[in-house]
Amino acid sequence: MAGAFITFEGIDGCGKSTQLRLLASELRVRGVPVVATREPGGTTLGQKLRAALLDVQEQVDPLAELLVFAADRAQHVRKHLLPALEQNQVVLSDRYADATVAYQGGGRGFEPKLIEEIVELATGGLKPDLTLLFDLSVAESAVRTRKRVQNKRTDRLDKEDAEFHTRVRNAYLEIAKAAPERFRVIDARGSVNETHRVVMDLVIPFLAERGLLSKEQSANGQGGRG
């Protein structure tokens, strides 16, 4: 598969969405073709599923939640991710399959075998080339999430209790431990700019090694592709 597939993971409030936007902007300045997307909601169908799944007023059964996330991912992979990668683009996704392992597996308690089978079915075996896990304590996550609630930018998962988010965080760390060749764990306690510098130090060499950045682009952000 051409291109590169980089995913951004972490518990709510870890700053991954902000870091994805900053990285996408920086890469575009350097002339790199970038697709920035998210799960759920990376396709037209996904946007509708996201609205239903994360509605704070909606009572969603855990199994329904698991299956709808899988349906969103199946559409996302086949209609958006694979075509972009085949066109040699760098795809940045705010959450992907690891989120299902962490949230529905670790958080909701579904059996690992069931999670594995559903993930495989939805993704068709497509795995990220690099995953950035933004690690943050549950206490700090709660502080940041409260700010989002005050600004009316909240969703149903934000309202889960600390025990749920602790299970999710622990699950993420276990996933990362089991796949060190793919994961890079980033301490998300720093400022936005501090974390962005860490992201750049990880991603720029990675893309250069894959031939998606020239020496000039890697060194100073100048120049275009082709």
Image: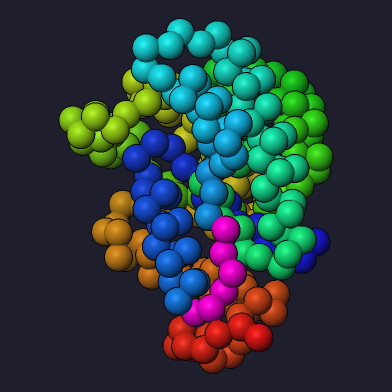
Main SS class of the magenta portion in the image: loop
Residue at image point 81% right, 40% down: 124
Residue 225 figure quarter: bottom right
Relative to 48, is 226 on the left or the right? right
Above or below, 221 relative to 204? below
Quadrant for the C terminus in the image = bottom right
Residue at the extreme bottom of the image, as rendered: 216
Residue 160 figure quarter: top left
- The magenta segment is 30-35
Residue at image point 52% right, 69% down: 202
Above or below, 97 relative to 222? above
Relative to 167, is 105 on the left or the right? right
Where residue 14 appears, as percent x and y from the top left, is: 37, 45
Residue 87 figure quarter: bottom right
Above or below, 43 relative to 15? above
Q: Is residue 34 magenta?
A: yes
- On the question of residue 198 being in view, the answer is no
Where residue 176 appears, as percent x and y from the top left, is: 60, 47
